[in-house]
Image (spheres, rainbow, N blue to C red):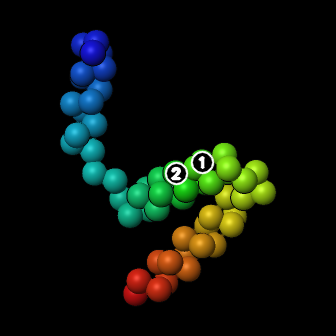
Amino acid sequence: MTKDLEQLIERSRGIEMTPDQLREQRRSFAYGNTHIENDRITREMIAAVDAKVEAERR
C-alpha cells in the first residue's frame, strides 16, 4: 500500500456521516448493484423502496 493511500484511509476513519449521507450512500450502493443485473432499475425505484423500508422501521 502506498503512503498516500495509507494517509487517506487513516483520515477517513475519523469521518462520521450524517443520516442523510448514509441514506444516499445506501441508495447509491443498492442502485449500482441492482442496475448491473437489471438495467430497468432506476434511482427513483431504489429511493421509493428505501423510503418504504425506512417508514416500516419506525
Mark 2: few/some/many CA within 10 Å (<14, 14-19, 20+): few
The spot of residue 49 in percent (x, y) is: 60, 73
The residue sitting at 41% across, 83% down in the picture is 57
User: Looking at the image, do the residues carrying marks 1 and 2 touch, with CB atoms under 8 Å apart?
Assistant: yes
Please tell me whether mark 2 sits on a helix, a strand or a loop.
Answer: helix
**Which labelled disc corresponds to residue 29?**
2
Spatial distance from mark 1 to mark 2, Cα to Cα?
5 Å
Q: What is the crowding at mark 1: few (fewer than 14 residues within 10 Å), some, or many (at least 20)?
A: some
- The residue indicated by pointer 1 is 32
Identity of the residue furthest to the top in this view: 2
Tell how many labels.
2
> 34 or 11: which is nearer to us?
34
Give how far across and how far down residue 19 sits, in percent: 38, 64
Q: Amino acid at mark 2?
A: Phe
From the viewer's perspective, is residue 25 above or below residue 54?
A: above
Between 1 and 7, the residue placed more toward the observer is 1
Task: Identify which amino acid the numbered label 1 is placed on.
Answer: Gly
Q: Is residue 28 visible?
A: no
In the displayed structure, would residue 40 be above or below residue 15?
Answer: below
Relative to 7, is 51 on the left or the right? right
- Residue 49 numbered mark, or none: none
